[in-house]
Every structure is written in structure tokens, then in C-alpha cells.
Amino acid sequence: MAKVPVQFTLNGSEKAEFVEGGTTLLHALRDKIGDTSPKGGCHQGTCGACSVIIDGELKLSCLTLAETCGGTDIRTTSGLAEAGVLHPLQRAFLDAFATQCGFCTPGMIMAAKVLLDHTPNPSRDEVVEALSGNICRCTGYEPIIQAVLTAARANSQNAA
Amino acid sequence: MALALQTFPTVRDANAALKAAGTRYLGGGTLVVRAANEGDVLVSSLVRSTDPALSGIAVADGRARIGASVTMAAIARHPELGAIAKAARAVGGPAIRNMATVGGNLFAPAPYGDFAVTLLALDATVSTDDGELPIGDFLAKRDDNHAIVTSVSFALPKAESFRFLKVSRVKPKGVSVLSIAAALEQAGDGAVSSARIALGCMADRPMRARAAEKALIGKRLDRDGIAAALAAAGEGTSPITDPIASAWYRAEVLPVHLGRLLLT
Ligand SMILES: Cc1cc2nc3c(=O)[nH]c(=O)nc-3n(C[C@H](O)[C@H](O)[C@H](O)COP(=O)(O)OP(=O)(O)OC[C@H]3O[C@@H](n4cnc5c(N)ncnc54)[C@H](O)[C@@H]3O)c2cc1C
Ligand code: FES
Ligand code: FES
């Protein structure tokens, strides 16, 4: 089958690829472009490990066809650190022991990032709701919730 | 997995392309791409349309019209759709809601289709280029449908006359044990003057609880008033069995949850 061209912005830089019809964004990002931060846990939409931000909205890259992403702005966890300095969410996840095996972490961080982008000071319930599509088999969730709340506090202190 | 995707600017052209064998419409893709990921070989090519008419929400004269490509997230945050926001928020987690469309929900097999349950209770009209159908007729014939759904429309309920409940084991998100939507009108003395109750997971697709509806007319929403409706709630149901719950369990708990919904 003929390959299809697709062009989008990934973490601020232009990407152009030829993909086979039906290629998921997850597959294109990991195996074509080499951004392995989104993880393939289930390929069914259930685990959230593949979560990315497309045009400001949290989406599952395993259920998104790469071809439908032409012209979009895609953000993944690998684009968060700036000049070697971790993003406050990444820092908070490390400090709070919110990452153990780490498989869920990039998806959790993407889900947390869209939350904090819209709701800089979320309540605990809002954090739980925002992470409700992401499964973690290691931490028991509590450290993750605490990490997101800590990052929110760090952000608001920096802003003040 | 090789899947050809064709994108058309108009619904008309997309409808023409959908006539080919093995072709399915692509909404948000949460079910159809998942099926392809799981190796469903019945889908060999996908069609979608970027027609702006599919993505609009219009509220006028007490009626709402929602384009088929509108997502659950867009419904949940729309200022004029507050009465039904709860039902849109009940679908999946945040990422699923950013992808799941109204059009796709109409085709989602149980245990999915929570928003379609709401549309059934609201007696919505489903539009395609071939015309309009009451949602009950549409759902009954959906397996033979080959036309793109363009929009759904319904009279917007007052917040107090619409009730929705989704029962799931994992909170806040989680697949339905069952879902119930009820549109109830009450006379001045509190007696129910009209009732539409729709159930999810009590058949392979959303269904009306007609016997319960009938038993509510003229009754007040108190323990005695709803007793006959609860006794009749299971009439005509054939609940699904899946890893979430057995048919037996769903049938047992339906009256309990319907009771809670009616008494809130
Ligand atoms: C992890 C997970 C959790 C979920 N949780 C829920 C839940 O809690 N509640 C719930 O109700 N659902 C749930 N779903 C199911 C699904 O996400 C929703 O039902 C959603 O609304 C389906 O819409 P879609 O646009 O993604 O459909 P798609 O996958 O794009 O399409 C589904 C079917 O509908 C057809 N179709 C789509 N749009 C049209 C149209 N406009 N005209 C004609 N045919 C069309 C497609 O051809 C396909 O056969 C869940 C799914 C996943 C993966
Ligand atoms: S890999 Fe996408 S949700 Fe699990
Ligand atoms: S840290 Fe292992 S799955 Fe979350």
C-alpha cells in the first residue's frame, strides 16, 4: 500500500514522515521518529501510557491514526525538560517516588500537564479525575497524586 | 496492519466512499482503531469527513443540535448543555472524552453507549443525509446503517427534569455495570405526568424501560409511588454478561439503582 505523507510539530520542531495507512501515532512517534516517551501498554485505550497532548488536548496516541495529525501541535514528555532542567512535574515525580518501574510515568505526566495548564491550583479530586484514564501498577497512585499537587504548588510559588 | 484512510471535505462524498465493502466510518476512533489494533480484519479501509457541519453545537428555541463529530469533552464543557453534562462526563477518562464522538457512541455496543442512553431518554432525532429517524428506530436498525450520522437533536431538558446515573466499579472512571437516564415531567402536585427511562447494559444496546415508565404515570416520586415501577423495571431486558458483571447481577441491581435515581 502506498505510504502517506504526514507533517506535524513535535515538541516545537517540524517533523515530516511517510507512514503506512493505518499507522497509529504511537507507532509513528516511537518507531519512525524515535520519540519513545509515549509507551504502548495496551493498544486499547485502557492504560493511558501512550497519552500525548495534541493541540492542547490529552489524546491516546494508540487510538489516533498518524494521518489524522497533519498540521497539529504534538507534545510528549520527552519535550518537557528545558536545557537539561527537568519540568516541575518531572522533578516532583522523582522527589515523591511517584515513579517506580516508570512505564506509566510519561502518560501520567502528560495527563497532569494538561490539568495544570488549565487548572494551576487543582483540588485533590481534580487531580484524581485528571489521572483517571491512566493506570499504574506500581505506586498505588497516592505518590503520583501528591507529586502533581506538589508541582502545582511549586508552579504557583514560582509565579508569585 | 494496513488500513487505508480516505478523508473527504463533504459528507456526501464520504457517504459515497462508504459504500465500498470493508469500509467503515472513522469518528474519534476509540472503538474502530482499537478493533484494528486487535486485528479485526473486517475493517480494511476507513472513511472520514472534515465537513464543519459535523462539528457544530447549536442551541435555539429550547432545542439542541449536536454534530456527530462533537466529542464528549466538548459537550461536557458547553455552557448551554449543563443539564446533560453529567452524562458526557460519564464516558471514559479525560483522553477518551477528548476523542469519543456522539456519532460513535450511537454505535457503541454494551457496556458502552452511556451517552446514547441519554439521547434515548431525551427522545432524540438522529439525522443522516437520507433523512431523520427517532433514536429508538435508529438504534434498532443500526447494524444495517451505512449512512454517516450527521447530527442528533433533542428538546433540551430542564436540569431538574433530567436524571442520569452510571454505575461502575472503578471510580471515577470505569466501564458501566449499567447506566440509567430518565426524563421526567411532574405536575404541580408532584405526580409524574410523563416519563422516559432509558437503560444501558440491559440489552446489547440502549433500551427503554417502557413498563417502568407506564407504572410511574400519576405517581409521586416517593417509596410507595415508585414501587410498581421498580417491580416492572426488568421487563423486556436481556442484560449482557461481561467481565464487569453477569446478566444475573445486572438484573438484580437494576431496581436498586433505578430506585436511587428516582428518589434523588
Ligand atoms: C478505554 C475506553 C473506555 C471507554 N469508556 C466508555 C464509557 O465509559 N462509556 C461509553 O459510552 N463508551 C466508552 N468507550 C467507548 C467509546 O469510546 C465511546 O462509545 C465513543 O463515543 C465512541 O465514539 P468514537 O467516535 O470513538 O467511535 P469510533 O471508534 O470512531 O466509531 C465507532 C463505530 O461507530 C461508527 N461511527 C462513528 N461515527 C459515525 C457517524 N458519524 N456516522 C456513522 N457511523 C459512525 C464507526 O464506523 C464505528 O463502527 C470507551 C472506550 C475505551 C477505549
Ligand atoms: S497504549 Fe494507549 S491507552 Fe494503553
Ligand atoms: S510506576 Fe510502574 S506502572 Fe506506574
Image: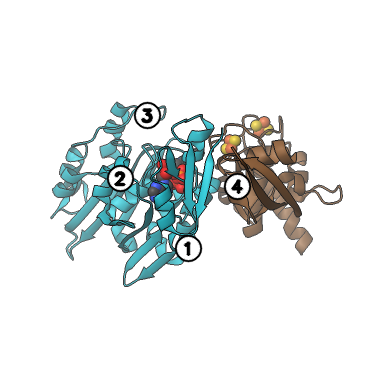
Chain colours: A brown, B cyan
Q: CA distance from mark 3 to mark 4?
A: 37 Å
The answer for which chain carries disc 2 is B
Q: CA distance from mark 2 to mark 4?
A: 46 Å
Q: Which residue is mark 4?
A: A67
Q: CA distance from mark 4 to mark 1?
A: 19 Å
The answer for which chain carries disc 4 is A
Compare marks 2 and 3 and give the one earlier in the sequence. 3
Q: Residues within 10 Å of mark 4 (few under 14, many from 20)?
A: many
The x, y position of residue B72, in whole percent, is: 46, 53
Q: CA distance from mark 1 to mark 3?
A: 40 Å
Q: Residues within 10 Å of mark 3 (few under 14, many from 20)?
A: some
Q: Are marks 3 and 4 on the same chain?
A: no
What residue type is disc 3 on?
Ala
Name the residue rendered at 34%, 46% in the picture: B146
Name the residue rendered at 29%, 27% in the picture: B248
Compare marks 1 and 3 and give the one earlier in the sequence. 1
Q: Which residue is mark 1?
A: B52
- The N terminus of chain B is located in which quarter? top right
Q: In this rendering, which labeled residue sits more in front, label 3 or label 4?
A: 4
Q: In this rendering, which labeled residue sits more in front, label 2 or label 4?
A: 4
What residue type is disc 2 on?
Arg
Query: Is B207 on the left or on the right of B80, as rendered?
Result: left
